[in-house]
Image (spheres, rainbow, N blue to C red):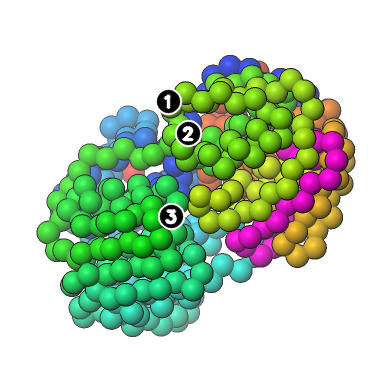
């Protein structure tokens, strides 16, 4: 079994470049189904979720051509069958974005119930409700979600709960619907804005992305484009936490500081020194970490995808911190792993009480999901002694070339079982 082995207690120092946003990439790649010619997508992260998206399109009949390590030409024009291969869909949560994209192009979509990280029930009822309101019908049969429509028609859609996934899926489907679609109580995350910008670049007419009300005027007149994905705010926040955990001094480059405001503010409250530049941040820590309370919320609040990382950091603070998960149920499954390293954390439902010990000790642990795996790395980098992290396939879903990146900052980390960095597909 592959695992990371980390010798902790070493300050991270140097510079690091952030990849393109995972959450944008896994929505924009399916969105190329709407293009009428080859699209060049730049700043793609070298992660397994992107590789799975590519393999899905390849098996459906798309042509994907390498331009350079982070840029690919994607031509989906030869695809005729609106069915995503079952074995690939179940490996990735974001496979459900093919529902909206295929429905928009073909009036039909067949996609397996999605897989990905297991940190609680994440239903897709809001996605299906939105499709139904657009004039589609759906059924779930044998683990497959089947959505069909003779004619998608614009309508008003109100989400009872803010949902990033449902906002993206309805945005994709409504792009080709007749008339005007209005999504109310829409999610506002940066990767939703990025998806809307890409869709507009190929001919869509989308207004209001980044606000709680998005308006889509449907069209059938699509083209193709050359597009660059935004930087990954969660990868950036993770490396910020790593620098802070190790009393390091790290310049984090290729970022959008505005997307990181909630993370920056929380870490500053903890005593971390952060200097902001146009497209980079310098993160340093010399003194002790302060206790803080954290509640995850939809954007622009503190992101749920940074909750495990900030919890790992808080185990190194002095005093009691309270972390409240405002988005998902059961997202504290990783806490037992931190406790193996000496953390003192108690969980009651969606609330974790972190009694900061100021130190951790290396131990064998496992990643329980993608962001939990990042938390294990943060804890391991700060801990005294050696930590072995198993289930690293979760981590590689969202962090490209992480071993070499950390080595460049002085970390003592190695991958046991395979080469030190994941082989990114050269052509699919």
Give me the C-alpha separation between circle 1 and circle 3: 22 Å
- Residue 123 visible? The answer is yes
Q: Is residue 396 visible?
A: no
Crowd around label 2: few <14 · some 14–19 · many ≥20 (10 Å): some
* Residue located beneath label 1 in the image: 278
Quadrant where the image shows the N terminus: top right
Placement of 49 over or under 40, stated as above or below: below
Q: Which residues are magenta?
A: 313-334
Circle on res. 188: 3
Q: Sequence order check: which comes first, mark 1 or mark 3?
A: 3
Which residue appears at 33% of the width and 61% of the height? 214
Label 3 environment density (alpha carbons within 10 Å; few <14, some 14–19, many ≥20): many
Q: Residue 257: give its label.
A: 2
Write the residue at 65% across / 35% down: 267
Q: Secondary structure at mark 1?
A: loop
Marking on residue 168: none
| The one of 161 and 30 positioned closer to us in this rendering | 161
**Separation of disc 2 and disc 3 at Cα?**
16 Å
Q: CA distance from mark 1 to mark 2?
A: 7 Å
- The x, y position of residue 202, in whole percent, is 19, 50
- The question of residue 333 being in magenta is answered with yes
Identity of the residue drawn at 48% across and 64% down: 163
């Amino acid at each position: 079994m592959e695992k990371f082995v980390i010798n902790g207690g070493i300050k991270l120092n140097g510079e690091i470049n952030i990849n393109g946003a995972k959450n944008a990439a896994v929505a924009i790649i399916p969105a190329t189904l709407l293009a009428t010619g080859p699209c060049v997508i730049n700043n793609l992260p070298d992660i397994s979720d992107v590789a799975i998206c590519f393999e899905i399109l390849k098996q459906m009949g798309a042509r994907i051509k390498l331009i350079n390590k982070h840029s690919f030409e994607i031509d989906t024009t030869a695809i005729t069958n609106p069915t995503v291969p079952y074995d690939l869909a179940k490996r990735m949560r974001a496979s459900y974005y093919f529902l909206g994209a295929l429905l928009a192009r073909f009036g039909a979509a067949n996609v397996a119930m999605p897989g990905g990280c297991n940190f609680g029930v994440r239903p897709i009822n809001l996605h299906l409700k939105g499709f139904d309101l657009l004039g589609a019908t759906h059924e779930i049969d044998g683990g497959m979600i089947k959505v069909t429509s003779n004619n998608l028609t614009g309508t008003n859609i109100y989400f009872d709960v803010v949902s990033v996934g449902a906002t993206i899926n309805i945005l994709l489907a409504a792009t080709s619907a007749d008339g005007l679609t209005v999504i109310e109580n829409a999610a506002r995350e940066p990767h939703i804005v990025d998806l809307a910008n890409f869709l507009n670049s190929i001919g869509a007419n989308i207004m209001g992305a980044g606000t709680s009300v998005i308006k889509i005027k449907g069209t059938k007149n699509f083209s193709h484009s050359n597009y660059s994905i935004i930087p990954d705010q969660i990868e950036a926040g993770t490396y910020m936490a790593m620098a802070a955990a190790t009393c390091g001094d790290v310049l984090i480059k290729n970022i959008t500081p505005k997307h990181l405001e909630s993370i920056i503010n929380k870490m500053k409250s903890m005593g971390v020194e952060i200097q902001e530049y146009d497209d980079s941040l310098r993160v340093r820590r010399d003194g002790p970490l302060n206790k803080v309370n954290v509640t995850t919320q939809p954007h622009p609040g503190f992101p749920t995808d940074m909750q495990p990382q900030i919890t790992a950091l808080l185990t190194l603070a002095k005093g009691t911190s309270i972390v409240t998960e405002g988005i998902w149920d059961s997202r504290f499954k990783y806490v037992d792993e931190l406790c193996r390293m000496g953390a003192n954390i108690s969980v009651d439902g969606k609330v974790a009480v972190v009694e900061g010990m100021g130190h951790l000790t290396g131990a064998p642990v496992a990643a329980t999901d993608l962001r939990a795996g990042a938390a294990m790395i943060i804890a391991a980098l700060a801990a005294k002694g050696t930590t072995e992290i198993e289930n690293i396939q979760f981590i590689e879903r969202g962090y490209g070339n992480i071993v070499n990146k950390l080595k460049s900052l002085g970390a003592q980390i190695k991958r046991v079982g395979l080469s030190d960095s994941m082989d990114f597909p050269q052509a699919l």
